[in-house]
Amino acid sequence: MYQAITAEIVSIGDELLYGQILDTNSKWISEELDRIGVRVVRKTTVGDDQASMLQAFSSAAQKVDIVLMTGGLGPTKDDLTKNVLSHFFGSELKLFPEALEDVRSLFESRGRALSATNRNQAYLPANCQYIKNAVGTAPGMWFEEKGSIWMSMPGVPHEMKYLMEKAVIPRLKDKFTLPVIYHKLIKTVGIGESWLSDIISDWERQLPSHIRLAYLPSLGEVKLRLTGFGTEQQQITSEVEEQIEGLLPLIAPYVYGFNTDSLASAIGHLLVQKRKTVALAESCSGGYISHLITGNAGSSEYFNGAVVPYHNAFKASILGVSEATLARKGAVSEETVQEMAKKVRLKFDADYGLSSSGIAGPGGGTASKPVGLVWIACDDGRTCHTRKLQLTQDRTVNIQLTAVAALNLLRETIIQKSE
């Protein structure tokens, strides 16, 4: 049976709390720890405040095996981490000659003299193990205190990454017998989280305790993440894959891919496999669907082109949509998107024509056609499949949801025609 090794990441700095800097460090650290089998159970952000830092350290000491800290190691008075750690561990600051020589050498290599302020970088808590930072002046500090491993690193991303790769990861591997963590993402579209949960509830209940399921919803999609914990990579991978084999028949119509697949890339694979092409006529989505498709390398093999006839006059003059249809039914109607899809398919000599027209907002809605009303269509030369969407009041969200729904309609049309 595996034993979980847990970690907390503590990010230090007022600039993180003010929103002036995005904390990319904790995301990167989490990914690296996951690779070696360390489970991050909490991330904490604190400002440059001694009381807040002490409270965060005290809480971490009670919960995890490893505490990784970033930030607050500069030479100026607002950088408090060394002093607070010294106080927390009941230690004192002392001069580390090796650290002094390293920081002196770094400054000399850059043609600069070592100032008194930067000399202070070599004063560290007496109970730490000095870890050389070859790419910066702020040293790393390794502690084995209060039943946990503690590592303090600079907040500068490239310095933190250097210390993680050169020192932290190797030491953690030596210190702990690390379990294996294996993740697999199953990506679904066209079904909500609660409906998905209802379908797979019986399957979910039978999962063994060392395999966990998480629902990760996003705009128009739901990712299912299966995470297995164990001691043998091959065994836990096999067990997770076996569970997925039992899951897929339950939700097959909604699954478009796994792990790094995107909906657009999955559709690209389908089109290549079937040797088919697509063309788009986008109104309310403004070219966003085309952007998603062409974001994938090799899309020229299956993407013939697109038109964005935003104004009604160009739906008629460029695409050839009937002016009578536009006058009688309006631009946001089933009939209009049907004509758009068919006309763009013919215009670009494609196998599939995909279209969108709607009221993205925030203005432009009426009682009969409110903001968020969108029609989409996919014409395959034999049948034109349409779908009516009633979305939100947010313009950006509506464009993104329209793109997901339209791509899914294309996916379903390709699959149905193949069958």
Image (tube, rainbow, N blue to C red):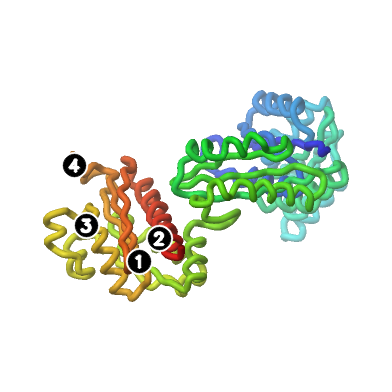
According to the image, label 4 marks what residue? Answer: 368
What residue is rendered at 21% in x and 44% in y?
A: 369
User: What is the spatial separation of the Cα atoms under label 1 and label 4, in whole angstroms?
Assistant: 30 Å
- Circle 3 residues within 10 Å: few <14, some 14–19, many ≥20: some
Q: Relative to residue 71, is residue 266 drawn left or right? A: left
Q: Would residue 156 be visible to someone looking at this image?
A: no
Mark closest to the chain's N terminus, 2 or 4? 4
The residue where tag 2 is placed is 413
Q: Of the residues tagged 4 and 3, which is closer to the observer?
A: 3
Instruction: Check the picture and name the quadrant holding the N terminus.
Output: top right
Q: Decide: marks 3, 1 in contact (CB < 8 A)?
A: no
Q: Which mark is residue 351?
A: none
Q: CA distance from mark 1 to mark 2?
A: 7 Å
Pick whichever of labels 1 and 2 is earlier in the sequence.
1
Nearest to the eye among marks 2 and 4: give it: 2
Say which element carries label 4.
loop
Residue 288 in sight here: yes
Disc 2 packing (10 Å; few <14; some 14–19; many ≥20): some
Q: Which residue is mark 1?
A: 380
Residue pointed to by mark 3: 335
| Mark 4 or mark 3: whose residue is earlier in sequence | 3
